[in-house]
Image: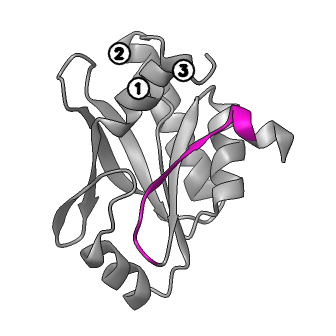
């Protein structure tokens, strides 16, 4: 599904909850997280990504299909040498099911976009050492 104002608004009206070793961290698009920035610096990570394999194209899939796809994504990340942490994507309006996700320290935006495209996603959330999550649309990257 292509980027629309409605989808963009929905992705921005979502809390991206990351399950860190010392508790959870709630992230929002374009809002700095000093705690995340400190954690990334302590681990010497210059980048991070948040992604899911669930509901490709923002079309609801069955729970079984979502679970299978998410497990495949996690295996792909582990096979590539990343250490993903669990995450959840929580829609503010509560009108979309909670999506399991992965928080991946050290995953570059380019690699996250490629992996997101492999799993049929519209967008991924990426950031750098500053701890600011940014919404990156996969379709827009075709022009670059």
Q: Is residue 52 above or below residue 97?
A: below
**How many C-alpha atoms fall within 10 Å of the one at disc 2: few (<14), some, or many (≥20)?**
few
Q: Is residue 11 above or below residue 43?
A: above
Q: Is residue 95 magenta?
A: no
C-alpha span from label 1 to label 3: 26 Å
Q: Is residue 135 magenta?
A: yes
Q: Position of residue 3 (x, y in %)?
A: 59, 24
Q: Residue at x 56, y 19 (%)?
A: 57
Which residue is labeled 1 in the image? 67
Q: In the image as oriented, which residue stretches furthest toward the front? A: 5
Residue 139 figure quarter: top right
CB-based contact (under 8 Å), mark 3 and mark 2 = no
**In the rendered view of the protein, which quadrant contains the N terminus?**
top right
Residue 41 figure quarter: bottom left
Q: Residue at x 44, y 11 (%)?
A: 61
Q: Position of residue 69 (x, y in %)?
A: 52, 28
Q: Which residues are magenta?
A: 130-140
> Which badge, 1 or 3, comes first in the chain's sequence?
3
């Amino acid at each position: 599904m292509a980027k629309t104002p409605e989808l963009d608004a929905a992705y921005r009206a979502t809390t991206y909850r990351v399950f860190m070793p010392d508790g959870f961290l709630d992230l929002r698009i374009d809002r700095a997280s000093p705690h995340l920035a400190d954690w990334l610096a302590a681990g010497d990570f210059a980048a991070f990504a948040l992604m899911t394999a669930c509901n490709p194209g923002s079309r609801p899939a069955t729970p079984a299909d979502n679970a299978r796809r998410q497990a495949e994504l996690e295996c792909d990340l582990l096979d590539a040498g990343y250490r993903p942490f669990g995450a959840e994507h929580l829609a503010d309006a509560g009108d979309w099911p909670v999506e399991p996700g992965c928080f991946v320290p050290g995953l570059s935006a380019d690699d996250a976009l490629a992996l997101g495209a492999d799993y049929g996603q519209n967008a991924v959330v990426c950031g750098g050492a500053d701890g600011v999550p940014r919404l990156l649309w996969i379709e827009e990257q075709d022009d670059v």
